[in-house]
Amino acid sequence: MLTAFGVVALTFMMAMYALEQRQRHFVLAFAVGCALSSSYGFLSGAWPFGVVEGVWTVVAIRRWAAMPSGLQSAGSPESRYPATGAADLP
């Protein structure tokens, strides 16, 4: 059961890491994934892994808190296809 928890926690963390560039909410979800992975590390007896993931949790929370709430990343559809108004037409 503990191994299944570890697999789910690490898979979630890596998926959120891959999606971080889309919205700031994924950065917070990555922090949650890091916290879950940290708890897995401590529960499985691999405390160095638990410590490292705990540090990544803090780093991700600080990154999330420092991001402006209205931030749209470079990979978002809004930044690739900006709305055009009548003033932009020739």
Image (cartoon, rainbow, N blue to C red):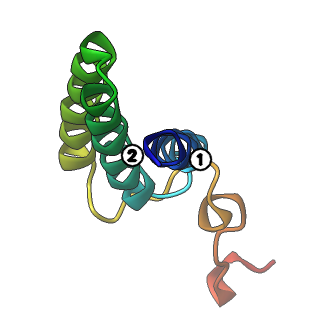
Q: Amino acid at mark 1?
A: Ala
Q: Secondary structure at mark 2?
A: helix
Please name the amino acid that badge 2 sits on: Gly
Q: Position of residue 3 (x, y in %)?
A: 51, 39
Q: Is residue 14 left or right of residue 1?
A: right
Counting residues from the N terminus, which is met first, the one under dot 2 or under dot 1?
Answer: 1
Q: Is 52 or 76 nearer to us in this picture?
A: 52
Q: Name the image quarter holding residue 24.
A: bottom left
- Please tell me how crowded label 1 is: few (under 14), some (14-19), or many (20+) other residues with Cα within 10 Å: some
Q: Nearer the viewer, residue 23 or 68?
A: 23
Mark 2 lies on residue: 33
Which residue lies most toward the top here? Answer: 48
- Which image quarter: residue 7? top right
Residue 48 lies, with reference to residue 7, above or below; the image says above
Which residue shows up at 48% across the image and 43% down it? Answer: 13
Q: Position of residue 65 (x, y in %)?
A: 18, 48
Q: Residue furthest front?
A: 1
**Quadrant of the snapshot with the C terminus:** bottom right
Q: CA distance from mark 2 to mark 1?
A: 9 Å
Which of the two residues, 55 or 48, is positioned nearer the viewer here?
48
Q: Nearer the viewer, residue 6 or 18?
A: 6
